[in-house]
Every structure is written in C-alpha cells, then in structure tokens.
Image (cartoon, rainbow, N blue to C red):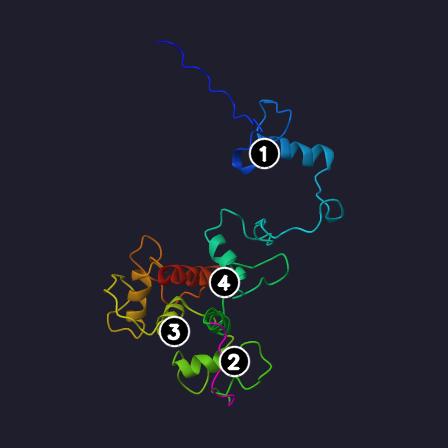
Amino acid sequence: MPTPPIPSPPTTSLAAGDTYYAFAAASVNYDLGLSMDEVVMDYITDELKGTVTEEAYGQPAGRITVDQGLAFTDVAATSPYYDGIEWAVDEGITNGTTATTFSPYQNCTRAQIITYLWRAAGSPEPASTEPAYTDVTDASLYFFKAVQWASEQGLVEGETFDPYAGCTRAMAVYFMWVAADSPEAAAASFTDVAADADYAAAVNWAVAQGVTLGTGDGSTFSPDTVCQRGQIVTFLYRAANAAA
C-alpha cells in the first residue's frame, strides 16, 4: 500500500488572503512557506522581546482580551469548583478570602449564601431599612441589605437569622428554590430526604435543575452537611446556566 503524501505546512502567500488587501498591490510578493501566525509570534518574541508597547504601537483598540484564569493559588484548573468560582468572581458575586486565595473548602455561612443570592439577583435595594431580625441590626454589615432582601422575599422566617451559622445543603437548595419562586419538580429519590421534609420540594428542584446530584453513590443528599464556599458558588453557577 503506497505511503500517503505528507501534507505541506500552511503557507502565507501575502496575496490579500484574510483581508490583507495591501499585499495584493505590492510590487514584489514572495511565498516564504511560513504561516502568518508564526511570523507574528516570532517577531514579537525576537524583535520586541515579548512586549508590545503603547509608545511604539499606540493604544490598544480593545478588540483582544486575554483570559489569564483565576489568581487563586488554592483553586487548580482541574478543580470541580473552578468554573463556578470563575463565574462567581466574574459576576461580582464574591471575591476571594485574600487576593490570591479563595478558600473553596471553607464552610459557607448563612450570611454568605444569602449575600451571594442577593448579588446574583442584581443587589436590589430592600424596601425597608428597619431590621428584620433581632440579630442583624447593624446596617454597616456587608450582608445587612442581603438579609433584609431575604426577609422580604420570604427566604427566611422568624425573629432571628443566625448569620454566622454554617449553611447546610438543605438550607442552600431551599434558599435557591424560594429565590426561584418555588417551582414544582418531579420527586427525587434520596434515602435521607423524607417526602414530607420542609426542604423536600427544594431538593427535587435542585436535582431537576442539575444543581446537585446528591452525595456518595447518589442515593443520599446529606441535607445536614455544611456546604463549602466552592460548593455554594458551583450550585449557583449550575442554577444560572439552567435558567439561561
């Protein structure tokens, strides 16, 4: 069987392809057998030493953006939380715990998830500034408006909010479900979620939306397990994609 011919590398004829019309009018035009992208990269690397300066080439036109990824050293590109964290940061829903860390495995508090939901909703101004809960009265707290909004939306009831308590998986999907106007969904089957549990409908919705598929082998939901920061923003990210 004859050996198939080796394809020739792409060449740049400089004959006005890709809208390089100026080359078509050139008096001399050579086919050097080099691709345009390689020529440009070599020029920037060898001649410009890797830097395209404003002084030499003017201000950028803003047509090219560079995604440099997350600046957090504790979130690997292979992390199951990476996309959710990147989305949350890009959308202004949350920042890192420092400039270079996100702390994805740190427990998430009730104040934090309510604030994330509030920001995801566009940070609306609450109708009232009168404290809704006896344990959230300081208007200077970063979560004060979010908690006021949560009360007005019916996400939380009672006289206290307990802002620094850990947010469990059941709480997380319940808050998200109510914020989504409590839609109906087919029943999910988890051995640790009773059909008459206060959060059962929220769990059903979360599974239907692909927010979570449960824990372990998928037969349990672990409703009382406290969520981590990476988990919470991933839940929100999946819900946002499902709603898009």
Q: Nearer the viewer, mark 2 or mark 1?
A: 1
Q: CA distance from mark 1 to mark 4?
A: 41 Å
Residue type at mark 2 is Lys
Residue 110 in the image: state x and y as whole percent: 47, 73
User: What percent of the width, then of the height, locates residue 148?
Assistant: 48, 82
Pointer 3 or 2: first along the chain = 2
Start-end of magenta stretch: 122-130
Indicate whether residue 114 is drawn in magenta. Answer: no
Tell whether position 125 is magenta: yes
Kind of residue at disc 1 = Asp
Residue position for label 4: 229
Classify 1 as above or below 26: above
Query: What residue did someone put label 3 on?
Result: 179
Query: Residue 212, percent across and down?
Result: 36, 59
User: Which residue, given by chain and number where applicable, does mark 2 sit on?
Assistant: 145
Quarter that holds the C terminus: bottom left
Q: Residue furthest bottom?
A: 130
Crowd around label 2: few <14 · some 14–19 · many ≥20 (10 Å) = many
- In the picture, which quadrant includes the N terminus? top left
Residue identified by numbered label 1: 37
Pick whichever of labels 2 and 1 is earlier in the sequence. Answer: 1
Is mark 1 in CB contact (under 8 Å) with mark 4?
no
Compute the Cα span from label 4 to label 3.
19 Å
Mark 1 and mark 4 lie on one chain; the one further toward the N terminus is 1
Say whether residue 75 is visible.
yes
